[in-house]
Image (cartoon, coloured by chain):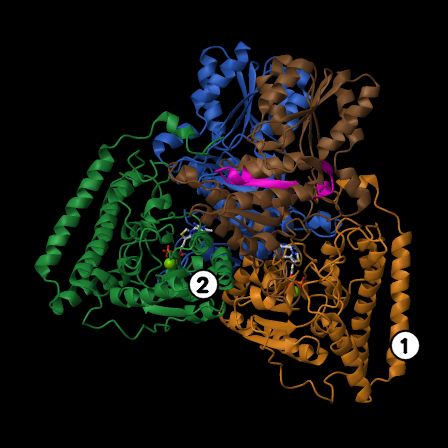
Chain colours: A green, B orange, C brown, D blue
Amino acid sequence: MSATATAVSAQGSDSPFPLEKDDLLSAYRTMKTIREFEDRLHVDFARGDIPGFVHLYAGEEAAATGIMMHLTDEDRIASTHRGHGHCIAKGVSVHEMMGEIYGKVSGACRGKGGSMHIADLSKGMMGANGILGAGAPLACGAALAAKKLGHKGVGISFVGDGASNQGMFLESLNLAGVWELPVIFVVENNGYAESTSVDWAVASDSYVDRANGFGLPGVTVDGTDFFAVHEAAGEMIRRARDGGGPSLLECKMIRFHGHFEGDAQTYRAEGEVEDIRNNRDCIKMFADRVSEAGVISRVETDAVDAEVATLIDSAVEQAKAAPLPDTADLLTDVYVKY
Amino acid sequence: MSATATAVSAQGSDSPFPLEKDDLLSAYRTMKTIREFEDRLHVDFARGDIPGFVHLYAGEEAAATGIMMHLTDEDRIASTHRGHGHCIAKGVSVHEMMGEIYGKVSGACRGKGGSMHIADLSKGMMGANGILGAGAPLACGAALAAKKLGHKGVGISFVGDGASNQGMFLESLNLAGVWELPVIFVVENNGYAESTSVDWAVASDSYVDRANGFGLPGVTVDGTDFFAVHEAAGEMIRRARDGGGPSLLECKMIRFHGHFEGDAQTYRAEGEVEDIRNNRDCIKMFADRVSEAGVISRVETDAVDAEVATLIDSAVEQAKAAPLPDTADLLTDVYVKY
Amino acid sequence: MTRKISMKEAVNEALDQEMQRDPTVVVMGEDIVGGTGSPGEDDAWGGVLGVTKGLYAKHGDRLMDTPLSESAYIGAAIGAATCGLRPVAELMFVDFMGVCLDEIFNQGAKFRYMFGGKVETPVVIRAMCGAGFRAAAQHSQMLTPVFTHIPGLKVVCPSNAYDTKGLLAQSIRDNDPVIFLEHKNLYAHESDVPEESYTIPFGEAAVLREGKSATVATYGQTVHRSVEAAETLAKDGVDVEVIDLRTLSPIDNDTVIESVEKTGRLVCVDEANPRCSIASDVSATVAQEAFGALKAPIQMVTAPHTPVPFSPALEDLYIPTADGIADAVRKTMAA
Amino acid sequence: MTRKISMKEAVNEALDQEMQRDPTVVVMGEDIVGGTGSPGEDDAWGGVLGVTKGLYAKHGDRLMDTPLSESAYIGAAIGAATCGLRPVAELMFVDFMGVCLDEIFNQGAKFRYMFGGKVETPVVIRAMCGAGFRAAAQHSQMLTPVFTHIPGLKVVCPSNAYDTKGLLAQSIRDNDPVIFLEHKNLYAHESDVPEESYTIPFGEAAVLREGKSATVATYGQTVHRSVEAAETLAKDGVDVEVIDLRTLSPIDNDTVIESVEKTGRLVCVDEANPRCSIASDVSATVAQEAFGALKAPIQMVTAPHTPVPFSPALEDLYIPTADGIADAVRKTMAA
Ligand SMILES: Cc1ncc(C[n+]2csc(CCOP(=O)(O)OP(=O)(O)O)c2C)c(N)n1
Ligand SMILES: Cc1ncc(C[n+]2csc(CCOP(=O)(O)OP(=O)(O)O)c2C)c(N)n1
Ligand SMILES: [Mg+2]
Ligand SMILES: [Mg+2]
């Protein structure tokens, strides 16, 4: 994939914002909650508090948030191994998420799933996924169910640039087209699959071409630009709801942390992480824009920051205090009835 | 896939032919051998002589022949369930093929494989395949071996229009691009996957688009036109040998028989089969052209016809007369050593 | 009203009745309608062997053809099952599991556990299994042990039309993912089947023939060969109890153990390959739970540790035969 | 020269030596070099846990990163193996088998048989297996029974660095497809390993501890737990023979049977799920072949019939423990 394919949705990213102040504040709150959640995990993981594999979404918040603002609980998303941001933006309780990551009964999955398997069907969150590409057929299934049951729900499939080469994902692009499913495929292109570059691993000039190869409309946006994502996703989701079928949205974005916690990131360019943190922080960019436009003041965002910090503190505290699962829990929940 | 995507390679299909007379005669002989082989199977299957699933290639001979004429035994092909034509064009003995189809020890696989698993590695034929799409990675492997071992061999992957939606095939398109493999993906588009139409099942306007979505050059030709196939394949194979990487060739073609023997074909249009047999028979078209151009006479093609009929007679006779495998054969050939 | 129908018809009838009963049941697979997008008749095929023929006329687009993309549509069936549908997806031949297993074993099978019991995935995956059809190595496997190994799946493999109808209805009404394996060599096999709808619970083996001398436990095609062996042995005064396991997960170990407590002798028959098979699973359970009742070594009769050969001459040797089963019973009687 | 190295280092060393020895050996997998196309260092990762680190510097582009397309590159490895290369392909976690199983079980495993013995497919598929890493349901499975079930595959699962080096060298030189499973929880485990290259033949179990009271047969991580149990039991005068199966296909039944003939008691320990497992396979074989030697029911100690739970509190209960194994031995002693 060529590094020059940066075509950004042209319109709609300028002031006046297409969102009410309340919505903007809520977007800010969501992004900030993800960031705070992730930064806290980063610290606590390094301290040895957290077991297992943890993949952080920090830096990519604008994408999850911009997309999920269009969705209700009836809409379903199928997420990835890097799923915390999707969960939070889709409305999963951060307390339940933190409990899950700590392996406690208070967790969203009662401690049985862990970071890579957080789900909350009641919120339309079909699960993070440890298997790359596996969510795409599941999202197609959600879209199929919406269609057959006659409601206006959509399915959203998230994949990374790496997972976009997985057969399950590619098959799903075609299936969605053939069955005319209300599903949107979101490629979260953060430039890397583990240590491997997207420029090498995706043999295609752009995701728009790849989408077209399956008869789907495709759009590439700057995934660090909340407004660009919000607009492009809104259009696709509206079209899908109205029976216009599937489409593909590439969000070009950046990963603040390593692939997983513990990654030394020697495959990245020197200074790359500092540079993106300083110059391409989607939350900072959002805050600057809304404050420069005079819509939301620094005082207001500071208040949200404080509120979010308290929320995450309490999530961590509760998670640490919560009981571990019971011996008996080992054998339950395999079947509804066996 | 829209039915109008019929762009045909423009040049080279006209007289003077780009092949010597001997080569033209040899192409005719190959096509005729395939046709005779298949037509005989059709009759003998109906009579109940032949066990199992048999998928006939009749009507599609120009594609296998036009491509395989560019190949040597060092080049590898990975075929499909509809593999007889590929085998014959790649030089596998019709006697061994017939023996295999009859389940005899004289068969190419000593009776253990059957129609769907005929292989002859010494001829570069890596196997028909009962699993659709599974051959594409294998052909990539052959191409990788050629590259690593430093010889000029290429790999050719055949898939049908149906199998072109299989994840293994789609992943292979990307892998071939990333690894710059000398491999050519041939989509044999005969309009149907079993009873399902390509127009419905492939959600894309053309295979050229699909190829481009994986960064590969793609070309569509009339697969019933031997010369068009021969030229387009020749160019792709030359480029691959010279380190120019992979590409995709769609051959639009027609299936004379049902999906497999026993198929009543009620999904086809009324008169469709008669029409294509009368007006789009690739062998007849070839013979007409070379005779109209005065290069090969009807007498010469008649002689080949007779020769081929004798060959197939003898293959059937030998296959019927050959012994069945022995009880002991059940347990051999699982491992080189266990 | 009971009449004789084939196993193929039993599948069709169960699907039909369940679709009538529950509007959330949908059926999908390659060519299960047949002819979608094609110029000829709709409902042209009704599946590669005609099993779903006629259902499209009755239920319309609740039956869906699919592109040749097993991961995508099987995964979609699983996803849809968590969203209010009750999909029945056909994987034409179980041999194709290798192209879509992740969706089955890492997704559908694990959802409930991974998500802490907060989800139900009522999906049925139907597939043809088994040898004897001259369909060669990639279209003739049982693969029952692979699915049985996986926690979270239920695995059904009936041997006759009656069980097929009742177990398929149960599979569709069941709230867990079910792998429903139809032995293609039994499709034409007929038995008495009530017209009205009924279900057969999972985890209940059927004792097809009572006997005191030895127990044969099996399922699928080899049920019939075991009964045949039992009939032959009866002439020699050997009185064999034949158990049709019917469902492999859950499995009815109690019925097998009860029988072995009576007979003291066990032969496990399995058309699957021998290693880590259903035969070895049942053997091991009995060797642990009913060791004291055993009067002789447990015998296993399975396919060999080879792929399925094409040549009819070899394929006939591959599948456990009535003779081979009878020999194993004689061996355990002699011990 | 022998020194202590870890199992992780043993894998690295075997790959290094075999690549030196045979120019047709190539190694491929996701991030096994690491950093391909990326702006930073080459050879940045050497695999997700650093197992192949340093090999790129020595052998250059005979190590290849791959896109995230397991069917394509594992299939390519298999295809290349029929064309003169000897590829070692890494499937990062064996749990990912569901996205590429067809290439393994219907292609590579069946070529030789389907093609009448006329082809060799010398390919090794390396993958991490096993629980204890807090990696949850989709990154912690054994799945050894699935591969062992499939004719045409060889299956290896070593328990220590010495065996790892010798068995991996053998796997690479072997002319059949080999599934080489590395228990991730043993990567740091160290043992004495010669510097020079050597091979260990397949189908030869190792008797790690001789004993007369009972036999424990196992492999992988539970080997160490079984030895621990044996040491505990020794204090009570129970003298346990511990057998490390090392290769599961072929499997060394002779050594197990010989041991059972001596001890009369067998406990089969398996970290895999219980149904159709290695534990049931070994049990069944002994119940058939050495029934007369058995003085007590065969005991199986396995993971439960559940996915692997994430919470460390549950995962620790999931894996068979030394205590659980000791209890099973006591049970068989009491019977
Ligand atoms: C089928 C499968 N193959 C490989 C992996 C191992 N793996 C986990 S994350 C990852 C890289 C993912 O890259 P990308 O899709 O770009 O997502 P990102 O991590 O960048 O968000 C890999 C290879 C996996 N989990 N599943
Ligand atoms: C993975 C897999 N899925 C399904 C099948 C069953 N099947 C065999 S041939 C066929 C249709 C193939 O259509 P196409 O690829 O267009 O090839 P054609 O038969 O037209 O040559 C199907 C669905 C299979 N063999 N393998
Ligand atoms: Mg990425
Ligand atoms: Mg076709």
Q: Chain of mark 2?
A: A
Q: Tell me the mark number nearer the camera, choosing from 1 and 2.
A: 1
SS class, disc 2: helix
Q: Quadrant of residue C162?
A: top right
Of the 4 image quadrants, the one containing the N terminus of chain A is bottom left
Q: Nearer the viewer, residue A149 or C213?
A: A149
Instruction: Measuring from the top left, give residue C100's x and y in whole percent.
Output: 54, 50
| Residue behind mark 1 | B303
Question: How packed is label 1: few (under 14 Cα within 10 Å), some, or many (20 or more)?
Answer: few
SS assignment at label 1: helix
> Looking at the image, which residue sits at the far front?
C1
Report the front residue among A247 and A4: A247
Would residue C187 be counted in the magenta stretch?
yes
Which span of residues is magenta-colored?
C171-191
Residue C2 lies left or right of residue D18; in this view the side is: right
As drawn, the label of residue A201 is 2
